[in-house]
Structures are given as C-alpha cells and as structure tokens.
Image: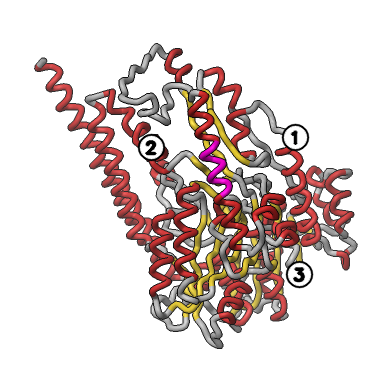
Amino acid sequence: MLKKFFFQVLTSFMGAWIAIVLAGAVAVIMAFALIGSFASGQSSGLEKDSVLRITLDGTLEERESSPRFDFSSVLAGQGESVHTVETLVAAIKEAKVNDKVKAIYLDCQGMSGAPASFHAVREALVDFRQSKKKIYAYADSYSQGDYMLASAADEIVMNPAGAVSLTGLGGASLFYKGFLDNIGVEIQAVRVGKGKAAVEPYTATEMSEVARSQSMALFDTLWLGMRQEISNPSRGLTPAEIDTLISRDLVSLKPAKFALDKKLVTALEYRHRYEDKIAKACGQKDGLDKVISPKELVSATGTPMFEANADNQVAVLYACGGIDDFMGSDGINSAEIVDEVLALAKNDKVRALVLRVNSPGGSAYGSEQMWEALETFKKTGKPFVVSMGDYAASGGYYISSGAQRIFADKFTITGSIGIFGLIPNVNGLLKKLGLNPQMVATNPDAMFPNMFYPLTDRQLEAMQQMVQNGYELFVKRCADGRHTTVAKIEQIADGRPLAASVALSYGLVDELGSLDKAIAYAAAQAKLKKWHAVAYPNVGNAFESFMKNLEKQGELMNAFSASASDPARMLEPALSAMRRLQGRGALQMSMPTYSFF
C-alpha cells in the first residue's frame, strides 16, 4: 500500500516536472523566434529599385491566421511555410502602384494549394502587368501549381537540369472498410444524396460509379479552365498542345531542352546567373540584394483591411475550413461566426457584409446556426454578399445560399447539397480485445447513439428519417435563398459537387468574379462612393497565439500527469471527444476535399 502511494506521488511529480521543463523550453524557443521575427521584419525595408520576391513554397491558404504551434517542429528547428491569398494579392497590388518596386520575381519551389487560390493570385499578377513592370519566373523544376502562376510572367526560366511537371488533374481516395472489418469496427451510415461520396470510404471497398462519374466531370471542367490559363497561343502553346504534351509525350519525364523546344519555358539558365540578370534589369549593381517579401511589403506600406474603427465599412467576414471540427483544427467555429455576424449587424460603421466562404462543409447544426445569424443580419437592410474561395460546398453552400448575390472563382467547387450521418459500432473490436460492455438503462434507447452496439432496425429507420428531414431543410434554405422552387433545387442537388461555372448555369452562383469584385458590388448596393474593406475576425498576434498554445501544452501535460497513476483515465480524452461529437449531433454536411497541387 505504501509502495503504491509513493509510486503515485512520484508519477505525479514526474508528470508535473516534465510539463514545467517542456513549457520552459517552448517559452525560450518561442521567445527567440518572436525576437528573430521582429528583428528580421525591422531589418528589411522598401528601397528604391526593389524587387518583390514571391517564394512559392509550402502551402497556399486563404488568409493570415495566428502563428501555428507545433511542438515537434519547434524542437526540430523547422517551421511550416504558409502563404496566403490575402497577403500575396495585397502585395502584388501594392507593387503595381509603388514606384520603388521595379518588378516581381516568382521563385518557384513547389507551392501546394487549390486551383481557386492559385487563380486569385494569378489574376493579381495579370493585373500587375498593366503597370508595364515585368514579372520574372524561375524554377529548378516547375510543379503544376507553380507553372500556373509562372504562366503569367514575362519570362519563364528554368534550370538546365530541371523539368516541367504538367500532369492534368486527378484525385485518389483511400477506402477504409476492409481495414475496419479486420479490426472489428463497423461504420453505420445514413445519407440523402447518391452523390454524397464522403461516406463511401467508410462503407465500401471501392468508389461507386456515381462518385467516379461526378468526380471525373468535376476534374474535366476544372482542367479545361486550367489548361486555358496556362496556354500561350502567341508562343504556339495551345490548350490542345498542352494535353498532347501530357498524354503523349509525358512531359514531366522529359529533359529541360524538350520543355524549351515546346515553348513551355522561355530560357534555360542557372539560378545565380538569372538572378544577376534580374538585378541588372532593375538597376541593382551588386546582384539581387534589394528584395522584399510580400509580408514585408504589406507591412512597410500599411496592412490593408484592418482599419476596424473606419467609417463606411464593407466588412469581409472570413469563414474558412471545416464547420465545427470537434477535434479543434483551424476550421470554422460556428458559435464564433454567429457572434461576429450579430456584432456586425449592430455596428453602425458596417454598411455591408461580404462573407468570404472557403469551406467543404461540416456540422449541419453549426451550418443552421450561421444561416440564421446571417438572416438576422439581412433584416438590418444592409447588403449581404458572398464570395467563394476554393470550396463553398455542402455546409459551405448552406451558409452562402441566402446572399443577395453570390460570386465565385471559376475554379471554386460548390454545390454538394446533401447530408449524411455516421455512427461507429466498435462491438467487434471490443470482442477482439476481450472487453465486454454492460449497460443498464430505464428505456431501450436511453444510451442512443451508442458505439458499443449496432443500431437496431428501428433506430436506423429513425436516423434515416432525421437525415431526410435535415436534407429537406437544406433544400428549402437553398430554394428560398435562390428564389426558386424546391423541385428545381432537388434536380441539381443529390450531393453532387459542382465547378462554379456549372453552378452558374444552374443558378447556384450569380457571377464569376474575385473577392474585390464582390466587395465593390456590396459597396455599390450600400450606395457608398468611398469605403474601407475591413477583415473579420481579427487575427491574434504572435504573442497571443504563443500564450494560448502554451496553455494547451500545459493542459495536455496536466492531463498526462493525472492519468499516469490511473490508466483508466487515459481513455477520458477519447471519450470526451466522442461526447462532444454526439452533443453536436450526428448529421454532417460535408464533401471530401482534393489535393490538386
């Protein structure tokens, strides 16, 4: 007994000690990182004959967010490179009108992202060229996403040992049912919409013909647009020739000389030599030393869209990521968005609202809450407009449907009007592990939903009816918002994801256009001759983010310390997550996302 007591005390002490040491280490590392970030930000300024150098690496996302914290990456000395459409577009706009910026240099190193985000940046580059300033693009080897941006440049130069990786569009889905069967887990699914393919990886061993055909139709539409963007008929590079280079010649495997001969690049050169040429063309005598990054340029000239106290605001409210991801990812917290919308409705300085949606959907409950808040905003008489990013599908379309006008990028994926519910049954797994749950309840369904036992026929029927009711509400919201009939929405619903150009023909989208176009439209509807576009919600600074993440690490360590002396408590985080998920309801409005670049 005494031995057990000392063991528990020692375990608790060790857990607390580990937490303190790790927290201290993180604090020191983050402090140095913040100081270094501050110092680097101060050392770089905007000089005469500067070049805006856009390094295309890491990932391309919608907007700036609080700096992310990943303990393993910090210890390894690695940082995640994240670029945003918000910052890149703002920097390119500033470079166009700023006399100190002579050119843009696209340093292509394999940035990943979705087509709509790349297209938004590309449109800004095309607009930049109206200034008569040049855009230079260079890569050791071009990825398909980088090439989409580089195709807007005056010069597309590549290392003599490089290659141009053009492959077309495709996607792969991993199906889990066989694995789940092997470990004794069954995913019980109910859905409305044959095209609601998000459930298939858990309930089938291969893609259905419906899912395959709708994905193929989506990819074909997006590829037609992308092929058109990167073509250059003046150089003899037609859309048809691009397909030939991909399908017949396997251009990705060809040497650099082949890419030059086929007009994919304008020259072959080693990096240092080409950068010297850029420097000379921009009036720099000591090599390419006067460069400024997008973040530095935006910072040096005044960060746009954050004048929260300005009058005549067009509020741009960002709703990005999965809706109510209970695991705590950087998605949409519906409760926070509801609070933001209601606050904007009461804010006399806000004259119009543009909801910037970049979401594949998520919680049906959260989607309905945001929809209702937006309806409340509309009752103020202020214009409400939607601008769609990479995705505005399923729950993302639900919250968009009531807008006065919907703008979408030509590469936006939207629609996917359907709904589903997933309830795991782990009874088989428990038997394999020798576990036997026993329950006592006053009513047959007191523990419903219960992942320890399969659904009964009566429960499954009730779940299907609940999903049907949710689908009917979804369709009605869309019909009312689009000023059409339920019957017409049902003809184009069924869970099918649609490219924006197709959604436009169905009336789900009103116009293909950028965020700037949506903002201008909202301002015009509010009868504003001058306005300030102000972004919401406000992004926390680095120190605030650090403290929040440090607090999370402390909570994690405390939980570890408390559970180390009681193994049964190790299951509590998983059980808590399950309870939160069940508390939100089992209904989901979501679609699978794709990795394009």
**Quarter of the image where the N terminus is located:** top left
Point out residue 42 in the picture as x, y percentages from the top left corner: 42, 71
Q: How is the image coloured?
A: secondary structure
Along the polypeptide, which appears first: circle 1 or circle 2? 1
**Along the polypeptide, which appears first: circle 3 or circle 1?**
3
Give the labeled residue for mark 3: 154
Amino acid type for the residue under numbered disc 2: Ala
Q: CA distance from mark 3 to mark 1?
A: 44 Å
**Disc 1 target residue:** 209
Give the SS element for disc 1.
helix
Instruction: Tell me where the magenta segment starts and ends, as one range.
Output: 465-472
Q: Earlier in the sequence, mark 3 or mark 2?
A: 3
Q: In the displayed orientation, state which residue is furthest to the left.
A: 2
Residue 551 is left or right of residue 351, and the answer is left
Looking at the rendered structure, the kind of residue marked 1 is Glu
Front position in the image: 434 or 305: 434
Q: In the displayed structure, would residue 369 be above or below residue 88?
A: above
Residue 346 coordinates in the image, percent (x, y): 38, 74
Identify the residue shown where x is 67% and y is 41%. Answer: 195
Q: Nearer the viewer, residue 224 or 85?
A: 224
Residue depicted at 67% across the width and 63% down the height: 509
